């Protein structure tokens, strides 16, 4: 019975973590980034080889990275314009609260 309860507790903790955080693997290791919306999208993302098209497919992740002040994860120089657009979008989303 104790194994069952331990399994239930472990599952609940993992589900909570995956609903509230992105686990991002960057050039310098792993980072936890708080999600903007609680869902199971992009629980684990390896961004080491991301290009602009990849970031366009993962806009909520990019917005969450900008919101958490970890913009150094968006290190590719070709993303400067996209980074500024996401920052403007995030400021617009959260300034209305």
Image: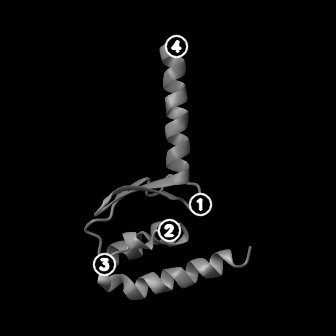
Residue occupying the point 49% across, 85% down: 85
Residue occupying the point 58% across, 63% down: 36
Instruction: Give the side of residue 45 with respect to residue 13, left or right.
Output: left
Instruction: Return the residue at label 3.
Output: 76
Question: In what element is the residue under mark 3?
Answer: loop
Residue 35 to residue 73: above or below: above
Residue lying furthest right: 97
Mark found first going from the N terminus, 4 or 3? 4
Q: Real-space Cα distance between discs 4 and 2?
A: 39 Å
Q: Residue 56 carries which label?
A: none
Disc 3 and disc 1 in contact, CB within 8 angstroms: no
Q: Which of marks 4 and 3 is in front?
A: 3
Question: In what element is the residue under mark 1?
Answer: loop
Instruction: Return the residue at label 1.
Output: 37
Instruction: Return the residue at label 4.
Output: 2
Q: Which of marks 4 and 2 is in front?
A: 4
Q: Residue 60 carries which label?
A: 2
Instruction: Give the side of residue 18 with respect to residue 79, left or right.
Output: right
Residue occupying the point 56% across, 84% down: 88
Q: Real-space Cα distance between discs 2 and 1?
A: 8 Å
Mark found first going from the N terminus, 2 or 1? 1
Q: Real-space Cα distance between discs 4 and 1?
A: 34 Å
Disc 1: CA contacts within 10 A as few (<14), some (14-19) or many (>=20): few
């Amino acid at each position: 019975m104790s194994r069952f309860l331990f399994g239930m507790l472990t599952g609940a903790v993992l589900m909570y973590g995956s609903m509230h955080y992105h686990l991002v693997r960057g050039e310098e290791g792993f980072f936890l980034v708080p999600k903007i919306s609680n869902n199971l999208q992009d629980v684990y993302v390896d961004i080491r080889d991301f290009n602009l098209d990849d970031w366009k497919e993962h806009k909520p992740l990019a917005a969450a990275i900008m919101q958490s002040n970890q913009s150094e994860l968006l290190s590719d120089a070709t993303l400067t314009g996209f980074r500024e657009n996401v920052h403007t979008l995030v400021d617009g989303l959260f300034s209305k609260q």
